Amino acid sequence: MTRNLLSRHRSFSAITLAWLAAVPAPLRAADFAEWKFRQALRVEAAGVVTFAVPPETLDAARADRGDLRLLDPAGREVAFALAAVAAPVAAARPAKSFRAALTATATQLVIETGDAASPGFTLVTPTPRFVKRARIETSDDGRAWQIAAEGALLFREAGAAELGVRAPAAFVRVTLDDTRSPPVPFTGATILPITAAAPSDLPLGVRIARRDEFAGETVLTLELAAARTPLANLRFATDARLFNRRVTVGIRALVEEDTIERTLASGTIYRLAPDGEAEVRHTRVPLDFAPPTRELIVHIANGDSPPLAITSVEVTRRELRGHFDAAAPGDYALLSGHTQVAAPRYDVATLRLGARALERILTPGPLTPNPAYRAPETLAGVALAGAALDTAPWRFRKAVRVATAGVQQLELDLDVLAQAQRGLGDVRLVRDGAQVPFLLERPNLSRALELTAKPADDPKRPRVSRWEIALPRTGLPLTRLTLSSPTALFQRQLRLFELIADDRGNRHERTLASAEWSHTPENKGPLTLALSTPPTSTALVLETENGDNPPITLSGVTVAHPVARLLFKSDTTPVALYYGHAGAAAPRYDLALVASQILAATKEAATLGPEEPTSVEAWPARVLRGGNSILFWGALALVVAVLLSVVAKLLPKPPAA
């Protein structure tokens, strides 16, 4: 039994918190008053002790766990090590032999595993999309076969795959049915390694805090019961019977004073039941990270399918354990919750885990406030206020509605995106003449906007179909345009452009995108045009050459623009958003120093009021700003006429005859 326990210990993944230098001199108990929480840990006998680290402990600790401390009954610091329990890792290997043969109605594969105890194997094929039913047979000698499974489903489809065969035997024969689809080439098999039983993952509380529908994807914001906990899996519960979706999981992170989404895990979830046969289901996405906050951002790619109905989600975690050498029995204490203390430097390399240390895992008591707690100085006490701002050069403003005090999340609307700089460097939040610092967040998301395409055919060009697409306003940062059509059969080259005027008032075409679009009765997918540059006018023109074919019909036009958000801390006093200053430089706020606290906080949804011009623009400025207008050229002609008249009067008169 001791050997088994020691082998279990070797399966712990080496994410040890501190293995360096010598143990520092014992500290006085009073030195630990700056730790906010403590947990009791009862040790019955001296020796090496193992204890589980609960999620609430990790949630109260720092992201690097460098503030965790263990005190003995006398209040002195004790060296310890942390390790996460994980499944042992073993390498797969190719099959000892692999043979493939074709018959009139089937493909037969014979795999010699080389080890009858192997749990199974995975087939290797270059084919990206197929679905096959198969019969699985096993044998000890390759001559006498026994049926292990009938009608097993093997497939690969858009990132989802079931190519594994669970059949421990020296020889395995797989017969794939080719009566409904062409044969699929298989090039080999990879034998799964024999591994020790993986430790069971533990549940972690989670709730869906927010669900947003964007163009072609669903975004779930999950709130975990605890942060900084090593996660194992994310599982979805849905009643949908047929789906195949790509899923990515990430967190918010700060990069160069902008918040972005950092993807940390991905996978494919699916549920298939071809031709009414037995279904296969895979709704789990593997995770292997400890998020620094309680928030997870989950993207579900829907493509052209309707959003997936998610009834609930489940998250599992890996257990984190601590090990230390108890000099004597008694009441030990685990401390957490110090934001500024340096990580300890322990030397526990000589620690040897015996059978007793792994046989009984201690669990600390509940997380309780430290009665001697004395709050250290932190950046939380610094007032987050910016410098004063003269708002006269800014052309527009909007009131910001804040319903509840705290960290706010404000999504910029079309008015702001159209009138502000492309990089949003002129956006400011102002309260009582002073700036309110914020973080600019640019998630990898897009909002969809439905538009209408009106036929605008030119009678002089009867073989060309043309549509006009009106935009709600100029300056929109559009990134793509999606078209749909009910026409069953066609192949066309489409071009999207806008008509813009030059300095002389002449209009010319400016191409924004072009692509070929085809429909067949089996494939009636939409066409997405990626715009090379955002439009500058309020109307787009789409045209295509029909040749000798009838015109096609457009049933829908959708444009997409990127999402931009501001994250800031505010009470309920009035705040205004200013934008529309072409010469403004991007702001730099000290708020970036505490960005992790802003990103980790629960966010309230702030909203924007209607657009207000900050001042009435004089007519000469409007004329000069719209230099391609008729008014400008009329005014210029009048000025030239006046100047010519003055010059004519100043010229000397010719002598009298």
Image (cartoon, grey):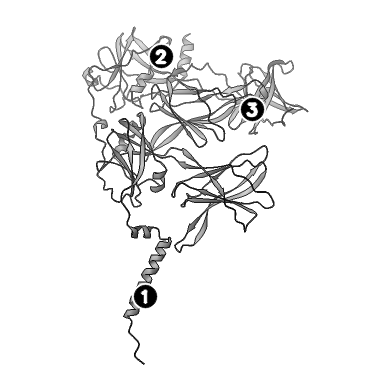
Quadrant of residue 643 within the rendered picture: bottom left
Which residue is at the far bottom?
Answer: 657
**Where in the figure is residue 311, as x and y percent of width and height?**
50, 22
Q: Can residue 257 be spotted in the picture?
A: no
The disc labelled 1 sits on which kind of residue?
Leu
Q: CA distance from mark 1 to mark 3?
A: 83 Å
Residue at mark 3 to residue at mark 2: CA–CA distance: 46 Å
Circle 3 is placed at which residue position? 155
Circle 3: element type: strand
Q: Residues within 10 Å of mark 3 (few under 14, many from 20)?
A: some
Q: Which numbered tag is attached to residue 644?
A: 1
504 over 610 or under it: above or below = below
Is the residue 440 above or below the residue 337 in the image? below
Q: Residue at x 38, y 58 (%)?
A: 625
Q: Is residue 455 left or right of residue 137?
A: left
Kindly report which numbered mark, 3 or 2, lies closer to the viewer in this rendering: 3
- Residue 80 in picture, x, y percent from top left: 34, 19
Residue at the extreme right of the image, as rendered: 104
Residue nearest the observer in this picture, 286 or 10: 286
- Earlier in the chain: of badge 3 and badge 2, it is 3
- The answer to whether residue 536 is seen in the rendering is yes
Amino acid on which disc 2 is placed: Leu
